[in-house]
Amino acid sequence: MGLQAIFFYIFAFVAIAAAFMVISAKNPVHSVLFLILVFFNAAGLFLLTGAEFLAMILLVVYIGAVAVLFLFVVMMLDIDFAELRSGVLQYAPVGILVGLIVAAELVVVIGGSVLTPEAAKSITMPIPNPAERTNTAALGDVLYTNYVYFFQIAGMILLVAMIGAIVLTLRHRQHIKRQDISRQVARTPATAVEVIKVKSGQGL
Amino acid sequence: MDSFFSTYGWPAIVMIGQSLLLLVCLLVFIAYVLLADRKIWAAVQLRRGPNVVGPFGLFQSFADLLKFVFKEPVIPAGANKGVFLLAPLVAVTLALATWAVIPFNTNWVIADINVGLLYVFAISSLEVYGVIMSGWASNSKYAFLGALRSAAQMVSYEVSIGFVIVTVLLCVGSLNLTDIVNAQHTGLGTMMGLPASFLDWHFIPLFPMFVIFFISGLAETNRPPFDLPEAESELVAGYMVEYSSAPYMMLMLGEYAAILLICSLTSILFLGGWLPPVDFWLINWVPGIIWFILKVGLIFFGYAMVKAFVPRYRYDQLMRLGWKVFLPLSLAMVVVTAFVLKLTGWA
């Protein structure tokens, strides 16, 4: 137990310190790099609780894909952070309100499961023994067997959103040379090459 | 205190020892793989390749190592110093960290975790950061363009690699790399009544995925013909252009460690890892690690030959291949594999 506690405090401390650096770093690229560090430590915390699949998916999706896009955008755009930061205090009331709501909800959820564990358990799926069933398989059961329709609907909504985003940004430009591989492959010497006998001294 | 040592201290010492042994073997292997790469390339072009240091140039990589270490690292004036020096470290650490879950023989693995394959996939998807950070921190247009190209390329080909991994996962039913190799004891060959042989390995039933994985691996590790990020003829050396001495060596080391990792992953997923090719007493007597190294070497030979043969892809062709050819193909294969497995009840 002692070692787990040590690792928990390492991960948690680094995550909080890095999260603070995300909002206080001067350079936006440094902010994103600190954000990646936060994700990484969150993955470590997931591992400590035995949720190995979630930890790996956090690495793949958030660090491997989402944060790369963040980094892309931040590097490509020349953001003047001093200007962006000048009016930051006027957002403070809204920020505090959102923070308070999230904190209150966390208290309700955690307090509920601490005070009445039975009631909290009655609405959740039973947790299988990790020694018998890996949590990859257990999550697969929940998503693809028990709640397959909800999962499919969520997938459909994402697909529609993706198509919508593509349609909104698609510009079809007419006067561009495009490579058509099937046409290139279908070309034969008969259609592409013409042999002309040139008489000497006359040219074409 | 004594129990603390026996529960945590001794396993930690064993694990550190194993890791050090693995790292030393891996680095020596990488040194010779680098040499082999240059020798094969030279042989295709009818050159001799490195042949001065040691017999047949066998010590060339070590001479290069000394040269890199003793040169002065130059940091460009406009560079972001911290990130500039962090990037090679990130690249090499991530590339080496993945080897912790690779099984070299029965039970020859440092961390035998349930989600081994997913771990490899996750860590190799982080390798893009070494590239982006080095490209951005160099504060140079060449380096930045190289980094952007490379990031787009690595993210694109990761998608099809992910689907290939899903098909293998469907066939095996486990993400543990040792389980994946052991599942290849039985397969098409044993179904036809033959003894365990190379016919059981996944590369026959999943042949299209094997090809997709090989090519995506080339793209993922920025090998030619997909070496646009460091296209020498247009971007000088891409994201590495401002690096010199030890940091440059670390970037190269990370790159070759990633290439070897993809080679060994191919041999684990499709070529039966350490399993011998035919069931025969003399061949069964050869230790599994030899088979593993031979298979990795064979796939690396393929990588080296592709580098020598194939001209570089254009950027739009690269993206077309990734998104319009490999993505639909691998997605269709996932569906087909799932249907076949469900209908026949093989898995």
Image: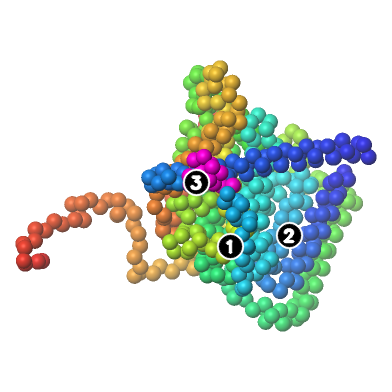
Real-space Cα separation, disc 2 to disc 1, in angstroms: 28 Å
Image coords of residue A86 (percent x, y): 72, 82
Q: Identify which amino acid the numbered label 2 is placed on.
A: Val
Q: Identify which amino acid the numbered label 3 is placed on.
A: Val
Real-space Cα separation, disc 2 to disc 3, in angstroms: 49 Å
Residue highlighted by disc 3: B52
Q: Nearer the viewer, residue A42 or B291?
A: B291
Residue drawn at x 74%, y 79% is A88
Does residue B197 sit above or below B117 in this rendering?
above
What segment is highlighted magenta in the picture? B50-62
Q: Is residue B310 left or right of residue A113?
A: left
Residue highlighted by disc 2: A38
Q: Nearer the viewer, residue B223 or B240?
A: B240
Image coords of residue A152 (percent x, y): 59, 49
Q: Chain of mark 3?
A: B
Q: Is B149 covered by the magenta stretch?
A: no
Task: Report helix, strand or loop for mark 3.
Answer: loop
Question: Residue B243 got which mark?
Answer: 1
Real-space Cα separation, disc 3 to disc 1, in angstroms: 26 Å
Q: Are marks 3 and 1 in contact (CB under 8 Å)?
A: no
Q: Nearer the viewer, mark 3 or mark 1?
A: 3
Q: Are marks 2 and 1 in contact (CB under 8 Å)?
A: no
Q: Is residue A155 visible?
A: no
Q: Identify which amino acid the numbered label 1 is placed on.
A: Tyr
The mark nearer the N terminus, 3 or 1, is: 3
Image coords of residue A77 (percent x, y): 58, 73
